[in-house]
Amino acid sequence: MILFYLDREDSPAIELYKDLKTNVGLPVSCLFHHKVIGASKLTAVNPDQTVITNIQTEDNETPVNIKDIKICFFSQYPYVHSGLLPFEEELDKLYALQEWNATLEAIFLTQKHIRYLNPLWGKYNLATEMEHIMLYQEFGIATVEMLLTNTPDDAREYYEKSGKEVIYKSVRGGYDSSGRMTTSDLTRLNKLHLSPAIFQKAHMGCEIMICLVGNRFLAKKTTMEAANVVYKDFEISKDLKEKLIQLSKHINVPWIIYSIIYDEFIDEYKAYSINPSPGYDLCIQIFGEDFNKLLRQYFIEEYNK
């Protein structure tokens, strides 16, 4: 079975789900996030050291048995938000929130037989851009120049050394987490000693968004036309493709978006970010219908292995 775990009933992934079920004839089941939380019957028993878990919602005539799943796709990770819970008492809601999240993560993280298109461990293992940079370098991929520091003087010196072309970023992300530095930001550096930050040299070139699914690629060059972002087809080198596939296999995440700066004048790549849990909507926005075709082929090939 292929399981689609979708965040909403109007998800663009619904069309792919219907296509695989109706036109291709693969055994596909679908669970909606809010219905799993609000109205599901979830049962797990352990009679012989083998956990068998059934999840049933009002949409399913028969329960989804986790042991029958070969491939799983999340359009939203199984994480419960408090707004999905019906409890009025805040303490009851917080407790239920904690228990639902722990249960769902345990179910999906402990099923070693399932091949995940976008596994949970991706978002945990690659949470910061510093990790992305070190991973790129481990596989021989050139990266952008950056400085991690909590020393104001070092940050100021780096800003001047980089020709005042610097992007600041928080280590983890969040409010006001990134932007291009200006001279007015130099006074803000006085508070840098409170926590470290990343300062990245703004390299010349265009941004290339690379989507890898299994061993197939889509790549788009980001350009601006009349104040609108436009994505145009782009061909990356064979050498870079091979390295990115090896990186993907190393972290055991088959669906990734890589972000790379490309300087066409000197034919040079500078990698800076890895998204191991990309959103379906984002991929459709950037890569269009070709992304659906890529996923379709992936599911067919993986199921028939």
Image (cartoon, rainbow, N blue to C red):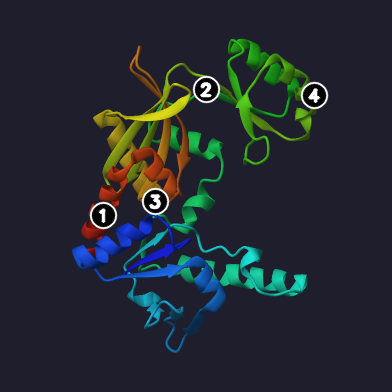
Within-10-Å neighbours for mark 1: few <14, some 14–19, many 20+: some
Residue in the foreground of this view, choosing between 199 and 134: 199
Does residue 1 sit above or below 261 in this rendering? below
Q: What kind of residue is marked 1?
A: Arg
x, y percent for residue 164: 62, 12
Q: CA distance from mark 1 to mark 4?
A: 52 Å
x, y percent for residue 265: 35, 12
**Which comes sooner in the sequence, label 4 or label 2?**
2
In the drawing, what numbered circle is on residue 145? 2
Q: Nearer the viewer, mark 4 or mark 2?
A: 4
Please give the name of the residue rendered at 29% of the width and 64% of the height, measured from the top-left corner.
18
**Which comes sooner in the sequence, label 1 or label 2?**
2
**Which comes sooner in the sequence, label 1 or label 3?**
3
Please give the name of the residue rendered at 35% of the width and 50% of the height, measured from the top-left corner.
254
Q: Total label count?
A: 4
Q: Quadrant of the C terminus?
A: bottom left
- Asked if residue 169 can be seen in this view, the reply is no
- Residue at disc 3, secondary structure: loop
x, y percent for residue 213: 31, 47
Q: What kind of residue is marked 3?
A: Val
Q: CA distance from mark 3 to mark 4?
A: 40 Å
- Residue at disc 4, secondary structure: helix
Residue in the foreground of this view, choosing between 146 and 175: 175
In the drawing, what numbered circle is on residue 296? 1
Does residue 70 sit above or below 193 in this rendering? below
Residue at which label 4 appears: 190
**Which comes sooner in the sequence, label 3 or label 2?**
2
Residue at which label 3 appears: 253
Q: CA distance from mark 1 to mark 2?
A: 37 Å
Please give the name of the residue rendered at 49% of the width and 18% of the height, measured from the top-left corner.
203
Furthest-front residue in this view: 226
